[in-house]
Amino acid sequence: MAELTLTINGQTHKVDVDPQMPLLWVIRDFIGLKGTKFGCGIAQCGACTVHFDGEPIRSCSYPVAGAVGKKITTIEGISEHIDHPIQKAWIAQQVPQCGYCQSGQIMSAAALLNHNHTPTDADIDAAMSGNICRCGTYQRIRRAIHQAADLINNNKTA
């Protein structure tokens, strides 16, 4: 066990955990943020995606000790009032079906749009390839990402 200090969604948290514990379990069980989901446990489905300094990572297979000193953002920290362009587009396009994968999908899409405000379909497919949607809402996801890019590029809030 070790006392580690993490910065999650702009807040500092001290946790006393095994340094090799997956970050996902620290986020969910010690910090109490339940939006980041467990899917596969082997970094293949993307349900556990969070941002490290703006880059998407799979928290289910990332040891918490590696998160010290990083700015971690979870789905709860992406916006305070569900007003991030990707969240607005997700709602407008009615992307979720069962919804289980959606926090990971949104986190990957937000990371893409942080770096590329005009993604092509190929850019979207590449950025989202590590996220699995069992319901198959991939076309709605793509439309929502394009809509969010338009919102960003036109500096619109709705």
Image (cartoon, rainbow, N blue to C red):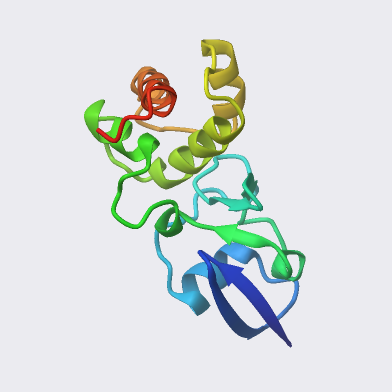
Left or right of 84, for residue 38: right
In the image, residue 84 above or below residue 8: above
In the image, residue 120 above or below residue 35: above
Q: Is residue 97 visible?
A: yes
Question: Toward the viewer: 95 or 25?
Answer: 95
Left or right of 96, for residue 22: right
x and y, in percent, of residue 149 in the image: 43, 24
Q: Looking at the rendering, in which quadrant would you find the C terminus? A: top left
Question: Toward the viewer: 119 or 66?
Answer: 119
Left or right of 91, for residue 55: right
x and y, in percent, of residue 110 in the image: 50, 38
Quarter occupied by residue 94: top left
x and y, in percent, of residue 41 in the image: 60, 53
The residue under the point 68% across, 56% down is 61
The residue under the point 67% across, 79% down is 5
The residue under the point 38% across, 29% down is 155
In the image, residue 78 above or below residue 129: below
Report the label total: 0
In the image, residue 147 above or below residue 49: above
Q: Is residue 136 visible?
A: no
Q: Residue furthest front?
A: 155
Q: Looking at the rendering, in which quadrant would you find the N terminus? A: bottom right
Q: Residue furthest top?
A: 121
The residue under the point 69% across, 68% down is 64
x and y, in percent, of residue 31 in the image: 49, 76
Quarter occupied by residue 99: top left
